[in-house]
């Protein structure tokens, strides 16, 4: 099977520490673990996760193991799903300060080089959009 990498980035108007913490908090709207139908989540090096996502009337399980957690710079974990055809891939999330903003980049390596594998780019883009919206909502609530 041929494999490829996908990368998506967004600049989010918030400090890296806040975005990093939202990413690892499954109770934070906008974080990638929020809203899972079922979640087993141990965000520490060698900690495991299982996230069951209900989408378009179907359940999509995702599994992985945290490899690196370097607050507030980087999170790396493995990723196995139907979209990877059961192959273990690697997701690296970086948080780069850009003045008062943060550039969040998701690099997913080792996904199948086919339509299903490349759809991860859309999925991660959606996650970054939700993360940006979650941070905006948090900032708006803090101003009240």
Image (cartoon, rainbow, N blue to C red):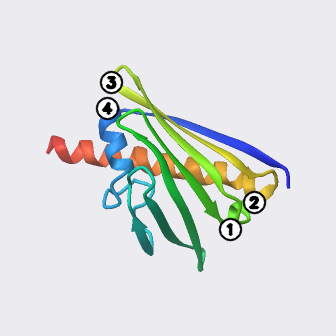
Task: Give the image location of residue 65, x and y in percent.
Answer: 51, 56
Distance between the alpha carbons at the discs numbered 2 and 4? 33 Å
> Is the Cβ of the residue at disc 1 closer than 8 Å to that at disc 3?
no
Q: Secondary structure at mark 1?
A: helix
Distance between the alpha carbons at the discs numbered 1 and 3? 38 Å
Task: Please give the residue where the numbered disc 1 appears in the rendered image.
Answer: 82
Label 2 or label 3, whichever comes before in sequence order: 3
Q: Please report the residue visible at 44 percent of the width from the left and 69 percent of the height from the top.
A: 36
Q: Is residue 34 above or below residue 136?
A: below
Task: Give the image location of residue 66, x and y in percent.
Answer: 47, 52
Label 2 or label 1, whichever comes before in sequence order: 1
Instruction: Please tell me which residue lies in front, 134 or 78.
Output: 78
Q: Please report the residue visible at 46 percent of the width from the left and 61 percent of the height from the top.
A: 48
Label 1 or label 4, whichever comes before in sequence order: 4
Q: Please report the residue visible at 43 percent of the width from the left and 58 percent of the height from the top.
A: 47
Instruction: Please tell me which residue lies in front, 31 or 73.
Output: 73
Q: Nearer the viewer, mark 1 or mark 4?
A: 1
Mark 3 nearby-residue class (10 Å; few <14, some 14–19, many ≥20): few
Q: Is residue 82 above or below residue 73?
A: below
Distance between the alpha carbons at the discs numbered 2 and 1? 9 Å
Pick the quarter of the image with the N terminus. Answer: bottom right
Task: Please give the residue where the numbered disc 2 appears in the rendered image.
Answer: 116
Label 1 or label 3, whichever comes before in sequence order: 1
> Is the Cβ of the residue at disc 2 closer than 8 Å to that at disc 1?
yes
Task: Please give the residue where the numbered disc 4 appears in the rendered image.
Answer: 15
Task: Give the image location of residue 129, x and y in percent.
Answer: 49, 47
Task: Give the image location of residue 143, x and y in percent.
Answer: 17, 41
Task: Please give the residue where the numbered disc 3 appears in the rendered image.
Answer: 100
């Amino acid at each position: 099977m041929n494999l490829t990498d996908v990368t998506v980035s967004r600049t989010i108007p918030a400090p890296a520490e806040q975005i990093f913490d939202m990413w690892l908090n499954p109770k934070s709207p906008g974080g990638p673990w929020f809203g899972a139908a079922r979640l087993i989540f141990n965000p520490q090096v060698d900690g495991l996760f299982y996230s069951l996502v209900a989408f378009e009337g179907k359940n999509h399980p995702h599994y992985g193991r945290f490899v690196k957690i370097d607050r507030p710079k980087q999170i790396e974990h493995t990723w196995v799903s139907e979209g990877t055809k059961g192959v273990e891939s690697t997701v690296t999330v970086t948080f780069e300060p850009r003045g008062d903003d943060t550039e969040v980049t998701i690099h997913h390596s080792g996904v199948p080089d086919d339509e299903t594998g490349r759809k991860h780019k859309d999925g991660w883009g959606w996650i970054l959009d939700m993360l940006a919206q979650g941070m905006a909502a948090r900032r708006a609530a803090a101003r009240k």
